[in-house]
Image: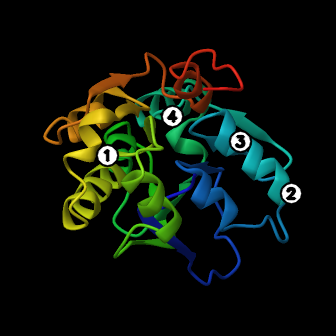
């Protein structure tokens, strides 16, 4: 059951400025862009999911990091040179400032461009509220610290904090698990690798009756 904590909306973009490579730190950034006149622009994506989105948008040269900003920074350092030209970093509003700073510290010129906005949801979907109230939710999956914090606030505002004591919270990284810690979940578990497959693996094997 989907319960978006962040509502994503692309920002209008003009033609991509000249750069030696395009960096995509999220799937939302990949979905907000098209290659237009430069389909062969090399793309470095934060993980395999973002890389798949970039390929679906029409980018031809896409390389994936291991799922987090640190691995994307390491991939840039291993494969690109500051003297070869600037890096185009496509981000959401308010996101990836630390990534840009880390790349600049390595000597790269970084063109940071906001290509989408992420607005906090004001309430959980009615279907999700009904399922929570009926006790039909056993696990909740979280993909970012910000969405974890927002979801906890929405649950608290809906008077559902006590119900969440019966729900396990599954986090895509230890950092997300830390954002979940102040809320009274039945338990919190985090992946050892920041990729969606590892998060789904935390669910374990479920029979049709589960």
Q: Most extreme residue toward the left, as rendered? A: 182
Mark 3 or mark 2, earlier in chain: 3
**Cα separation between marks 4 and 2:** 21 Å
Name the side, left or right, on which 189 lies relative to 4: left
Q: Which residue is mark 1?
A: 145
Residue 204 badge: none
**Residue 157 in the image, given as x and y percentages of width and height:** 20, 67
Disc 3 is placed on an element classified as helix
Mark 4 or mark 2, earlier in chain: 2
Mark 2 or mark 1, earlier in chain: 2
From the image, state whether disc 3 or disc 1 is nearer to you. 1
Q: Residue at x 33, y 66 (%)?
A: 94
Q: Which residue is mark 4?
A: 72
Q: For this rendering, which residue is in front, 173 or 92?
A: 173
Disc 1 is placed on an element classified as helix
Q: Is residue 99 above or below residue 65?
A: below
Give neighbour class at mark 4: few <14, some 14-19, many 20+ (Cα, 10 Å).
Answer: many
Q: For this rendering, which residue is in front, 70 or 179?
A: 179
Mark 3 or mark 1, earlier in chain: 3
**Cα separation between marks 3 and 2:** 11 Å
Mark 3 or mark 4, earlier in chain: 3
Q: Residue at x 31, y 40 (%)?
A: 105
Name the side, left or right, on which 29 lies relative to 58: left
Disc 2 is placed on an element classified as loop
Give neighbour class at mark 1: few <14, some 14-19, many 20+ (Cα, 10 Å).
Answer: some
Residue 10 picture quarter: bottom right
């Amino acid at each position: 059951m989907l319960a978006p904590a962040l509502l994503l909306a692309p920002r209008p973009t003009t033609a991509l400025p000249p750069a030696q490579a395009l960096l995509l730190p999220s799937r939302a950034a990949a979905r907000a862009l098209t290659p237009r006149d430069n389909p062969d622009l090399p793309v470095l994506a934060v993980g395999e999911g973002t890389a798949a989105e970039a390929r679906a948008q029409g980018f031809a040269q896409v390389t994936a990091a291991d799922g987090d900003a640190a691995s994307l920074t390491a991939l840039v350092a291993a494969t690109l040179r500051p003297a070869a030209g600037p890096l185009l970093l496509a981000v959401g509003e308010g996101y990836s400032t630390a990534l840009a700073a880390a790349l600049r510290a390595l000597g790269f010129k970084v063109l940071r461009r906001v290509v989408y906005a992420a607005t906090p949801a004001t309430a959980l979907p009615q279907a999700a509220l009904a399922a929570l109230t009926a006790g039909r939710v056993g696990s909740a999956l979280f993909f970012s610290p910000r969405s974890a914090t927002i979801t906890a606030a929405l649950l608290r505002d809906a008077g559902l904090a006590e119900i969440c004591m019966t729900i396990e919270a599954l986090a895509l990284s230890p950092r997300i698990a830390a954002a979940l810690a102040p809320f009274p979940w039945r338990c919190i578990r985090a992946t050892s690798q920041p990729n969606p497959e590892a998060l789904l693996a935390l669910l374990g094997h479920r029979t049709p009756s589960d």
